[in-house]
Image (spheres, rainbow, N blue to C red):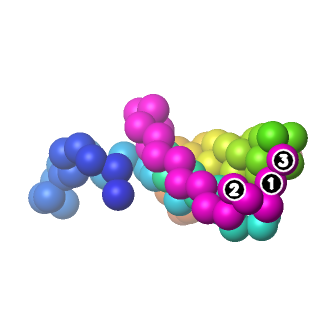
Amino acid sequence: MIPGPRPSDSDEAPADPQADVHSPDRSVRIIASSHGDVEVHVQGLHRHSDDSLARQVRAAARLALASLQQARREVEFPRDERRPEG
């Protein structure tokens, strides 16, 4: 869990969007917030070379970024208020 204050009342601002993703082989886990807080957990280092581990970290980072961007859009434009696509 990312440390930091969280709103407790429903009239306060919505909680900070957060991503919790794994790399394709599940050896890298990234937990990130839109405020820049990041945790990286790595397991199974013995099965990776520097290059293969870097690929897994990049893949997880892309997933985390996409997740945060999607969460931000959902906060800014709730489903019933979203702009028409196209």
Q: Which residue is mark 3?
A: 49
Q: Residue furthest front?
A: 46
The magenta stretch spans which residues? Answer: 33-49
Q: Quadrant of the N terminus?
A: bottom left
Per the model, the C-alpha gap separating discs 2 and 3 is 8 Å
Q: Are marks 2 and 3 in contact (CB under 8 Å)?
A: no
Per the model, the C-alpha gap separating discs 2 and 1 is 5 Å
Asked if residue 85 can be seen in this view, the reply is no
Q: Position of residue 27 (x, y in %)?
A: 68, 62
The kind of residue on which mark 3 rests is Ser
In terms of secondary structure, where does tag 2 sit? helix
Q: Is residue 42 above or below residue 68?
A: below
**What residue lies at 34% left-to-right and 50% top-to-bottom?**
2
Q: Are marks 3 and 1 in contact (CB under 8 Å)?
A: yes
In the rendering, which numbered label is found on residue 48?
1
Question: Is 29 part of what is drawn in magenta?
Answer: no
Residue 65 picture quarter:
top right
Q: Nearer the viewer, residue 63 or 46?
A: 46
Per the model, the C-alpha gap separating discs 3 and 1 is 4 Å
In terms of secondary structure, where does tag 1 sit? loop
Q: Residues within 10 Å of mark 1 (few under 14, many from 20)?
A: some
In terms of secondary structure, where does tag 3 sit? loop
Question: Is 43 part of what is drawn in magenta?
Answer: yes
Asked if residue 69 can be seen in this view, the reply is yes
The kind of residue on which mark 2 rests is Leu
Q: Are marks 2 and 1 in contact (CB under 8 Å)?
A: yes
Please give left or right for residue 9 compared with residue 19 in the image: left
